[in-house]
Amino acid sequence: MHDEIIKKILEYAGSDDVSGETYPVFSGEGYKTFKIEPGNFHRIKKQVSGRKIAFIDGGNAQGIGSSNFSLSLMRVGCVCYLDGKKIAYKKNNFFALINSAAGSDEIFYEASFYGVAPDFLEAEAFDSMDKTLMLGMNRAYINGGANAIRRFAELSVARTASETNGFCDAIVLDGNLLASITHEKKHMDGLQESCSKNNVILAALSKTSSLFTDKAKPLSAALGGLCNMPSWFYNPVAEISNPCHKAEIFFAKFHGKSRHVFRLDILNSQKEHAEDIIGALAGYCSDPIFPGYPYGLIEADRVSRVSNEERESLKAMFMLKLRNRAIEDCISSSDVHGILDKI
């Protein structure tokens, strides 16, 4: 049985065939894809750009919660580098409390913030049946709102960086530039307008990509198997007319010793700067811990990460202060998995 499983996995994973006409595949409307062509690979020219690049990432962890409320610690890290040297960093910590509320005919999740929340971040309300938060046909879990708030906080911190005179010349987010969650578009639009106004280049690098070819192969792996250059970028991928995704998409392998190919989004109105930014990012990708991945994003992840120890400490503190039978009953109603995990 095991041999049969291994054989089947190798069958699916072992071939990234792009012979004949092969195209990328996008979900949703507003994407006109281009055929994958060997001539669309370009050598990366690593360069010292003289640009101050701000790398931004966020983390969050629920301290306590139940099916009708969730209290999470939010943290966003912004680390700025100039020609490989860290010159500044900022860290935003705040709490987001999300609670359920009854609407006219539905349940809503409302968010409120405690501590110093990022500029431009607003209290939001989400329909619990919001399709951008739901899992299948089930009502969205309340902590799904916390993940959305973290994303909005990242975009808000990026906007503050773009509007702080002299702080940075370029911003690299973790993720992409697609506004896919309810309320996200207004935050993304505000950031993009600010970057355009202040001549700050906006980009986003995805750790993973869910894009496929029309032969059902991962697009990043298919491209990686086509090019023998030690480091390269690939473009064009698609012409995008989706109003929620104002980007030009690139794929890049930043280091000759890396096996990773990353997707890079750049604000479409700034795509003429793409080669310069890709060359500058390649200069940040020689860290032996993770060759091929910008160490500015590694540092932003480190600054923003909420550790398991910190999460458990927060939970213990709040449980101590919230010695209340009603609270304990609410929490126990959603803590069955935690009990089973300890058995």
Image: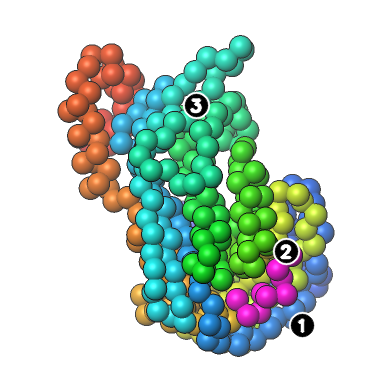
Quadrant for the C terminus in the image = top left
Check residue 110 in the rendering and tell me which mark sits there, or answer none: 3
Q: Nearer the viewer, residue 125 or 66?
A: 125
User: Mark 1 — residue?
Assistant: 39
Upstream in the sequence, badge 1 or badge 2?
A: 1
Sequence order check: which comes first, mark 3 or mark 2?
3
Q: How many labels does the image show?
A: 3
Q: Which residue is drawn at 77% across and 63% down?
A: 238
Mark 1 or 3: in front is: 3
Relative to residue 306, is residue 281 depicted above or below? below
Whole-percent x and y of residue 42?
A: 68, 83
Check disc 2: other Cα within 10 Å, few if <14, some if 14-19, many if 20+: some
- From the viewer's perspective, tell me whether residue 73 is left or right of residue 236: left
Q: What stretch is highlighted in magenta?
A: 269-277
Q: Distance between the residues labelled 1 and 3?
A: 50 Å
Q: How far apart are marks 3 and 2 (CA)?
A: 34 Å
Q: Look at 63% across and 80% down and name the residue there.
A: 276
Q: Where is residue 79 in the image (x, y as percent from the top left)?
A: 42, 65
Q: In this view, does 143 lie above or below 242?
A: above
Circle 2 residue: 268
Say whether residue 48 is visible.
yes
Q: Is residue 270 magenta?
A: yes
The amino acid marked with disc number 3 is Glu
Q: Hey, what amino acid is under mark 1? A: Gly
**Tag 1's secondary structure?**
helix
The answer to whether one can see residue 225 in this image is no
**Mark 1–mark 2 distance (CA, rounded to whole Å):** 21 Å
- Number of other residues with Cα within 10 Å of mark 3, as a class: few under 14, some 14 to 19, many 20 or more: many
Which secondary structure is most common in the magenta stretch? helix
Q: Could you say where residue 241 lies in the image, as x and y percent from the top left?
A: 80, 54
